[in-house]
């Protein structure tokens, strides 16, 4: 393993360089680690990539960008200067395929490049994602070591989620496994200016693109979901209740989904229900109805004698409330919460350095199962 790991960004947008409505920004997390260099930023919009590089070279940690190049295509990068690892932050439609310009992961795997890939894995077709997962399983790093893949389900690294998971494991050991998962993901839509969010052809829809974090936590906390049990319904954009009063306007001055064909506009509300293979029941309510910028997200788990409520896991105000044996505890913990994006990045880099894939909590093959559930919910809701 070289002394300094050479990392390239594929995608110069919000998730990799910050902005938008949340705390993401992989570059800033990378800057806090030792022994890494950013070798390239690839984006179809090279002007944008250049301006991100300029900002970073004049920011708090310029050194890791000293030899960084800007490129318009990931193929050009793989052909000219192979990095050790890439961080892929592309719209869902631009990656996760077996052929063509969206075959990013497959070509990186063939070149032996480790990958941190943002969710979702693609914009549709779980069959192709299954095929890709199998191909990635076979792939090796240069020298024959394991090829590390990590998918951006950062909530798996959240201290509160750890705490909740430990309580559920403890309860299960005492013969009281979890019985119910309830997830409520209420997005604020008023300032979402990403065209992909509003167009199912680009994102797969809000369950695949957004509520996927909660579907993944459902699997992480309660185990596998029986796909055949999934039922769902939705309020579509064209329904009477689907008319949004504060639709943001794009550069053209038109509403964000005005130019999207009506059957490709995203659902305003999706309610889904399923059974886990353990026999437990799960339920998810996603909506894109709130004004302002703040999302309201909350999940609950119930077991015999246990009720856990995790509120607002995206923010510093996150709380975990547990009622156990009839008594409600003080929210845990009031202070000292970790940064799950940093923990995710540290795990990825350590897994590469130490050749230990088990440090990654969301490898591609596991994330493919979350993707499959989100596709199933989306299809069931549209029936
Ligand atoms: N885990 C999280 O917390 C989190 C947060 C935000 C976004 N995301 C996910 O990250 C992904 C990217 O989101 P974003 O907000 O950064 O989007 P974005 O639109 O801000 O950035 C995407 C970038 O990809 C570039 N691009 C598009 N097609 C390309 C191609 N073929 N080759 C090279 N560049 C191309 C675009 O020019 C753009 O700069 C989405 O799937 C989103 O769901 C995850």
Image (spheres, rainbow, N blue to C red):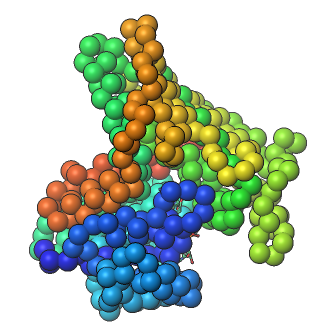
- Residue drawn 68% across and 42% down? 287
Task: State whether residue 205 is above or below residue 132.
Answer: above
In this rendering, position of residue 138 left or right of residue 93: left
* Residue 284 on image: x %, y %: 58, 34
**Residue 110 in sight from this viewpoint:** no
- Residue drawn 17% across and 65% down? 353
* Residue 277 on image: x %, y %: 39, 28
Extreme residue toward the bottom, this view: 80
- Residue 44, by quadrant, is bottom right
The mark total stands at: 0
- Residue drawn 56% across and 45% down? 211
Q: Which residue is at the front of the view, 129 or 29?
A: 29
In this rendering, position of residue 294 left or right of residue 142: right
Task: State whether residue 253 is above or below residue 227.
Answer: below
- Residue 161, by quadrant, is top left
* Quarter the C terminus occupies: top right
In this rendering, position of residue 185 left or right of residue 103: right
* Residue 325 on image: x %, y %: 38, 8
- Residue drawn 52% across and 34% down? 311
Extreme residue toward the right, this view: 240
* Quarter the N terminus occupies: bottom left
* Residue 178 on image: x %, y %: 40, 21
Q: Which residue is at the front of the view, 51 or 366?
A: 51
Task: State whether residue 38 is above or below residue 298.
Answer: below
**Residue 3 in sight from this viewpoint:** yes
């Amino acid at each position: 393993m070289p002394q300094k790991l050479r990392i390239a960004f594929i995608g110069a947008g919000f998730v990799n360089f910050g902005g938008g409505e949340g705390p993401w920004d992989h570059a800033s997390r990378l800057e806090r680690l030792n022994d890494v260099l950013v070798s390239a930023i690839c984006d179809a919009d090279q002007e944008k990539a250049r301006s991100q590089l300029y900002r970073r070279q004049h920011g708090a940690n310029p050194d890791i960008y000293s030899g960084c190049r800007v490129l318009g295509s990931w193929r050009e990068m793989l052909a000219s200067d192979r990095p050790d690892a890439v961080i892929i932050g592309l719209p869902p439609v631009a990656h996760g395929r077996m052929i063509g310009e969206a075959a990013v992961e497959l070509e990186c795997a063939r070149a032996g490049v480790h990958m941190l890939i943002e969710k979702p894995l693609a914009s549709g077709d779980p069959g192709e994602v299954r095929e890709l997962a199998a191909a990635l399983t076979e792939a090796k790093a240069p020298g024959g070591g394991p090829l590390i893949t990590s998918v951006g389900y950062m909530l798996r690294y959240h201290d509160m989620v750890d705490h909740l998971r430990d309580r559920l494991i403890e309860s299960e050991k005492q013969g009281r496994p979890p019985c119910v998962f309830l997830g409520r993901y209420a997005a604020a839509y008023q300032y979402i200016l990403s065209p992909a969010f509003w167009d199912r052809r680009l994102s797969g829809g809000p369950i695949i693109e957004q509520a996927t974090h909660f579907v993944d936590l459902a699997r992480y906390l309660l185990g596998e979901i029986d796909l055949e049990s999934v039922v769902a319904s939705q309020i579509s954009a064209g329904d009477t209740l689907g008319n949004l009063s504060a639709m943001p306007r794009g550069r053209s001055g038109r509403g964000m989904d005005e130019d999207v064909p009506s059957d490709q506009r995203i659902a305003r509300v999706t309610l889904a229900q399923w059974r886990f293979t353990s026999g437990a029941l799960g339920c998810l309510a996603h909506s894109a109805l709130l004004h302002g910028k703040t999302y309201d997200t909350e999940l609950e788990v119930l077991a015999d004698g246990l009720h856990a409520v995790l509120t607002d896991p995206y923010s510093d105000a996150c709380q975990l409330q547990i009622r156990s044996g009839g008594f409600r505890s003080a929210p845990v913990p009031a202070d000292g919460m970790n940064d799950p994006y940093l923990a995710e990045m540290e795990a990825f880099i350590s897994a590469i350095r130490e050749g230990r894939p088990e440090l990654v909590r969301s490898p591609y093959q596991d994330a493919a199962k979350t993707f499959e559930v989100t596709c199933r919910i989306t299809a069931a809701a549209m029936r």
